[in-house]
Amino acid sequence: MTTPDSGTAPVAAPPDPMWPEPFEVRQVARETGDTFTLTLVPKVGSQPHPFAPGQFNMLYVFGVGEVPISISGDPDRPELLVHTIRAVGATTRALQKLKRGDQVGVRGPFGTRWPVDQAHGQDIVLVAGGIGLAPIRPVVYHVLRHRALYGRVVLLYGARTPHDILYARELRDWRGRFDAEVEVTVDRATIEWQGGVGVVTKLIQRSPFDPSSAVAMICGPEVMIRFASLALEKRGMTTASIHVSMERNMKCAVGLCGHCQLGPHFVCKDGPVFRYERIEPLFGLREV
Amino acid sequence: MQPGDSVVIERVVLDALLAALRERGYETVGPTVREGAIVYDEIRATSDLPAGWTDEQEGGHYRLRRDDREALFGYAVGPHSWRRYLEPPSLVRWRGRRVDGGFEDDLTPGPPPRYAFVGVRPCELAALLVKDRILLGDPGADPDYRSRRESAFLVAVNCGSPAGTCFCVSMGTGPRFGPGFDLGLTELVDDARHDFVLQVGTARGAAVVEGLPHRPAEPADLTAAEAVLREAEGRMGRSLETEGLKERLERSYENPHWDEVAKRCLSCGNCTMVCPTCFCSTVEDSTDLPGTRAERRRIWDSCFSIEFSYVHGGSVRTSAGARYRQWITHKLATWHDQFGVSGCVGCGRCITWCPVGIDITAEARAIGGPAEAAGSRP
């Protein structure tokens, strides 16, 4: 190639969304048998990454790979990036093995947020299944911190077994408050389990919230989202006031790689949080 | 000379045009014959162009034939599209180096390549504009595409030789080019003449032409060029009814015809590899053997692979029918929601290069066609 024309030399490149920024591991804490919570702080010289409840980051382990993980920390403490992760593949297992002081690459935050600002003055109904409690936790932190801005606050959580209950200590704390209704149920009880047994969607029918003035946020397996929404609609809520967090394969996180498509939506940028009425037609269709 | 002007250049002047572009620092890329197909590669002179070749295309069928007119652009499109230059199939997006306890960037960005694409067909020009909507929509999202695209010089060539799988007329993308080119050619070749009507599209295009021998285009030249295009319009091998197609596809998620397509579809992904608008890619992280240097590459991917829709615990689209549905529904329906245009420009490559000849126009008719009332439900 010959020399380019003068005046067309590349200008300073804008920050590239594909470049991971190094963060330092503050803590790796075991949650359940296969889940753990990773707390990251910006490396000296790196900026904190403020986030909104519902958003996710791409976490990169040097030379191993990158995975999308929702942020499960407190949005009012952006200096700590907290992610609760299930160790299921090469990258998440590598994340599990990290020690304090190790580094993780971070890209993000990406995606849409839970409607905590639009829900002022209304009842908050949070429905979570399994590890789906992790993306809901920032909402709990936010709502409890700004408690006076909201009506009744209900958290309904279902896990497979008592051993799979995430954030058990915090759940107990939240349950002990007089200004929040927290219900936990399991699919299969163990001998020492004193709580309820059954699917989380069953808890919706007798939950103390006002369907005419409530905002629901659901995160869990798609089948659970579907039945939870049906139960909420049966209580009189509309699909416009129900919000759900969706999961698809996120690779680039900026809507360019095509992997996370759900019908016309790119889950990475049009989601992961959707108003349910927008995506309801796609629920129940197979393999979309 | 200014944008909008038309002149006539002799066939030999095309060599001077290539030389002028190279002098300006462009790598000139265009059609050339290799391994029995017309592909894109570096061309240094018109002798590298497929003079006297034409192509024969049908579902799952592509052959080159001699054509004694000795036209330089007497064929439709081959398996390559310009995508391979603007979004290379495998591209380094980031490099890092291990340092104690962590890693740091290890980037040595070189100057972006500057290409002059010679022989951009109208359907491909339309595809580039579709790609711009996707990859330039969010400023900064894809800096590599931006720099390649912004420096690319486009020499479009009107299409006088549509193939049996072409349907650009249905998609409104050809055979005559729309806006977006720097220079636009129409090849005029018969017993009496072999020259080109050249339309100037941009000021930088005009600057190149001013240095070349040319004469003003006479009405007779423009009439001759128009005749070539009128004739090409009548030779479309395929057609696609686009009116209401998006809505019909959106209603057809549960159509049993998807299972019928799945019996033929090999899920090979050829259609996505030859498509000029397909943009799906994956991000691949790797290291060198000692594990001290890591690299992140963007690699072309296809929605026809099972891994494409993998989320922890399994893939969303495990059946071939669901993957074909994703592809055609994306191209012809949800693309409109996402980018405001169709994802199909009617180039016909997916039909030609499908090993079993699955035809997007036929499947769109079978699934979402006007007669869908009969076929949408069992």
Image: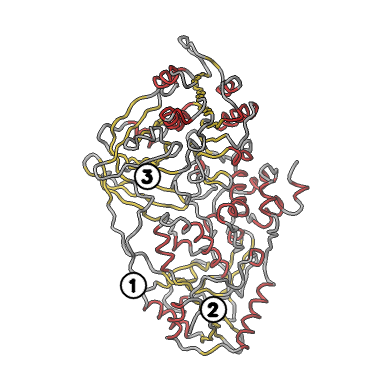
Please report the residue visible at 68 percent of the width from the left and 59 percent of the height from the top: B242
User: Chain ID for label 3?
Assistant: A
- Looking at this view, name the residue that lies furthest to the left: B100
Label 1 with label 3: CB-CB less than 8 Å: no
Classed neighbour count for the residue bearing mark 1: other residues with Cα under 10 Å, few (<14), some (14–19), many (≥20): few
**Dividing the image into 4 quarters, which one contains the C terminus of chain A?**
top right
Please report the residue visible at 48 percent of the width from the left and 73 percent of the height from the top: B118
Q: Report the front residue among A169 and A116.
A: A116
Classed neighbour count for the residue bearing mark 2: other residues with Cα under 10 Å, few (<14), some (14–19), many (≥20): many
Secondary structure of residue under mark 2: strand
Residue on which disc 3 sits: A107
Residue A286 x %, y %: 62, 38
User: Chain ID for label 1?
Assistant: A
Label 3 to label 2, Cα distance in Å? Answer: 45 Å
Tag 2: amino acid: Leu
Q: Report the front residue among B24 and A158.
A: A158
Residue on which disc 2 sits: B185
Residue B363 x %, y %: 68, 53
Secondary structure of residue under mark 3: strand
- Looking at this view, name the residue that lies furthest to the right: B374
> In the rendered view, does A227 fall on the left or right side of B84?
right
Classed neighbour count for the residue bearing mark 3: other residues with Cα under 10 Å, few (<14), some (14–19), many (≥20): many
Q: Report the front residue among A55 and B133.
A: A55
State whether discs 3 and 2 lie on one chain: no
Q: Nearer the viewer, mark 1 or mark 2?
A: 1
Total numbered labels placed on residues in the image:
3
Tag 1: amino acid: Gly
Tag 3: amino acid: Arg
State whether discs 1 and 3 lie on one chain: yes
Residue B368 x %, y %: 70, 51
> Where, by quadrant of the figure, is residue B253 drawn?
top right
> In the rendered view, does B358 fall on the left or right side of A89?
right
